[in-house]
Image (cartoon, rainbow, N blue to C red):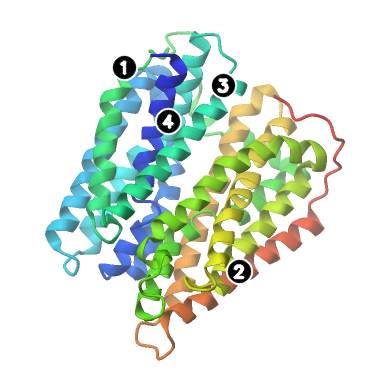
Amino acid sequence: MDMRNRLIVMNFLQFAVWGAYLTSMGRYLGGAGLGDVIGWFYAMQGIVSLFMPAVMGIVADRWVPAQRLLGYCHLLSGLLMIAAGVYGLASGITGVEFAPLFALYSLSVAFYMPTLGLANSVAYTALDRVHLDSVKAFPPIRTFGTIGFICSMWVVDLTGFQDTAMQFVVSGLLGLLLFAYSFTLPPCPVTSGGRSKSLAEALGLKAFTLFKRRKIALFFIFSVLLGASLQITNGYANPFLDSFKSVPEYADTFGVQHSNILISLSQASEALCILMIPFFLKRYGIKTVMLIAMVAWVLRFGLFGLGDPGDGVWMFVLSMLVYGVAFDFFNISGSLFIDKETTTSMRSSAQGIFILMTNGVGATVGTLGAQAVVNSYIDMDSSLPQNEQWSHVWFIFAAYALVVAIAFAVLFRYKHDRTPVKQ
């Protein structure tokens, strides 16, 4: 099989594992009586991202080839996720307890999150072996990861698993499939001598010296503030759409019955918006691109608050479409900006800090903050319909994103010189 096709299969499975539960888990947890702790399940992904990718990166650099470690991590993650699913199914929808389910899930994601970086390492190494330019060859390959994410979302939706713990079993089985497939991938080298990374370098601690530069320090701070928005809709969009079941005129609409398919438009938009980034960065610069992302987050949340699955479903669809701009223009453009503003010797450390700020600190704090807001406003015993209670929640999130956007526009100063983005 051609190397590109082999890596396409790897990326497809890598993100199919995640897509099987990431957007539907909140719906299952809400139905199982764990709606008030949904945030902890999503925050755990950020918590383990603070240290597990760095630890596994050291292991892959020094002792275990990355393609094998990728497989071992998926083996452990898959088995633990299957165990979580089996526990949920055996307990029934009303007998699930937080502690055992959360423990199994947490251990599973602790081994899954490092595979995101390991899969990239395997891909870059494989492309080098066949003398392909990773800058040109990798983005189309990575797009199939998003396609895999969408496909598993659809499978879970159409099989009716988004309301049950069976979604965890599907994810675990896909992980075991990738475990087996990983051993067919080209070998990655390990460091046998010479200068190896210190723990501080692997954790990206050297990059903290960048905080001495006001522009970079502000950018990292806003990365945390904007990173707080990353997992909110992953965790709460599906429970929100499910709340319309209690309204007779919306109960049988497509958006309620097949919410995961509706949400998958967000991932489709994400795949397409990646292609727009080079043009926008070159023409408008990082500040404008980041502001566009922040405004997109305002629209993402605000349209959820205004829409409904009936005549207002177009607002939900538009919210899904702007997600690609909100996510990509922030994550990918921010990564390119950090690359441009740092030296080659500090490139990896700086990127590590960016991920730490966004997917680690920002996403964790944001998810737990979102949980506090949801728990304060969603009252099952209130006379106010639950879908109307949700509107208040989305408007709070939209207001937060708007405040961050205004603060960024005022405080962050960056002169765009229209030079090409560094490749």
Where is residue 345 shown, x and y percent of the image?
Answer: 66, 22
Give the residue pinned by disc 1. 184
Callout 3 amino acid? Ala
Mark 3, other Cα within 10 Å: few <14 / some 14–19 / many ≥20:
some
Give the residue pinned by disc 4. 11
User: Which one is nearer the viewer's eye here, 200 or 70?
Assistant: 70
Could you say which disc has been placed on residue 302 in the image? 2
Depicted 10 relative to depicted 301: above or below = above
Mark 2, other Cα within 10 Å: few <14 / some 14–19 / many ≥20:
many
The numbered mark, 1 or 2, whose residue comes first in the sequence reads 1
Disc 1 or disc 3, which is closer to the eye?
3
* Secondary structure beneath label 3: helix
User: Which one is nearer the viewer's eye here, 292 or 59?
Assistant: 292
Mark 3 and mark 2: Cα distance apart in space:
37 Å
The numbered mark, 2 or 4, whose residue comes first in the sequence reads 4
* Secondary structure beneath label 1: loop
Mark 1 and mark 2: Cα distance apart in space:
46 Å
The numbered mark, 3 or 4, whose residue comes first in the sequence reads 4
